[in-house]
Amino acid sequence: MRVLVLSNGIWKSGAQHATNEFLEFMSTNPNIEIKIIGCYEGNFVIQPNSIEIHRVPCKSIGILLDMKIDKNFRQLIQWADVVWIATGEYTVAKRIKRIKNIPIVAHIHSYEFICPIMIFSYKLAEICNGCSPWRIIQCKQGIHRELTKVGSLKRPKAQVYWLLDFGKGPLDYYLWKRAMSNVVESIDFFIAVSRATRDIVVSHLPEVENKIEVVYNPVAYRPWRYLSFIPQQRGNYIFYAGGANIHKGPHILLNAFSLLRRWGIDVELVMTGTAGTWVEALARRLGVDRGVEFLGKLPEEEYFRLMAGGRVTVMPSVWPEPFGIVAVESISLGVPVVGSNGGGIPEVVGNFGAVVPPHYEDVANAIVSLSEKDYDRYEMRNYAYEKFGEKNVEKLIKIFNSI
């Protein structure tokens, strides 16, 4: 079977990491031949390097990434038995179908099919659904108000954005609507990264209900590409890996950490991807900055070493995470997870952590509770391997064959 993979390869997103893991396993299958089409821009991060990569110009259409079909692209379409849109390059599907009636499988890592803005939540609480120009205006303005509350956005700038949203919202909607025209109809099968993501997509696109299946990301092995052992002792710190993205809930965690300090609990907090951001300023306002280590983007080995040494990993996301790669990585390393009770996180955490509403009191209580439990770290790793391991690659390959 010849699989043509579309993966932009521009940034190291969760979707890109998951795609890399799929490719790592698929490249060893003697019955599959893989070729990749990616974008010129940025540093290409696709692995393994043994796979042939063809690059084309790409352009952004709001949250969507559109690929140009050149002569080599056309030849690869003729070569392939199936096209796998791995990281969201959906708009090219309708043009591929005009060239060849080839099966197309699209991976759904987020909500681009139902929402035309990059920040997919309304007031950081729900999916920005029921799309219309007015709804998008409300979504944008609600998000900007929340960013102002936590100090990520200054009030004068927020007021300017509030006015601009009246024009930008309808424009985003129009561009998204035009780009996605006939795209869903051109795709033969959809892969959702969690049951929660599947349910959200189907609730908005009931026409895909009979051609969508859940395949978990096989990322449980990823930490072990960089580490060789599980530390026997946990450090006295909480680990957070969501950066300064407000949707990941760093403000929730800082308020929870402030509460832990008031309770007299002696624990530190390590936050990656937050150095020099508004998260530091918020910590100073809360008076907890001396107990927090703010780090930038780390090399993979150092990142996983810190994660493996923590007492608990916290994912207080304030929107429905489609999957939750950080949670899988943490459990694979034997570290329990406090996660939000929405999106795909509960499916990941299972019995090796706690899922709570993204409110700081609930998060603080869950951290205390988990810190007192003694988990079998090897049992946790085996759970991660079983649920988020190579079986998912086999499932994806079966889907390719079936269509």
Image: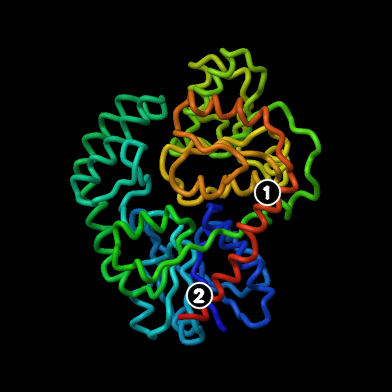
Residue at image location 62% in from the left, 56% down from the top: 219
Q: Which residue is mark 2?
A: 399
Q: For residue 125, which numbered disc appears in the image?
A: none
As displayed, is residue 398 above or below residue 364? below
Q: For residue 332, which numbered disc appears in the image?
A: 1
Residue at image location 40% in from the left, 71% down from the top: 68
Residue at image location 68% in from the left, 81% down from the top: 30
Q: CA distance from mark 1 to mark 2?
A: 26 Å
Instruction: Identify which residue, 308 or 44, lies in the foreground.
Output: 308
The answer to whether residue 72 of the structure is visible from this angle is: no
Instruction: Identify which residue, 241 or 334, lies in the foreground.
Output: 334
Q: Label 2: few (<14), some or many (≥20) within 10 Å? A: some
**Amino acid found under the numbered disc labelled 1:** Ser
Q: In the figure, is residue 179 to the left or right of 249?
A: left
Q: In the figure, is residue 98 to the left or right of 20?
A: left
The answer to whether residue 66 of the structure is visible from this angle is: yes
Q: Quadrant of residue 180?
A: bottom left
The percent position of residue 132, horizontal first and vertical second, equals: 20, 51
Residue at image location 44% in from the left, 72% down from the top: 105
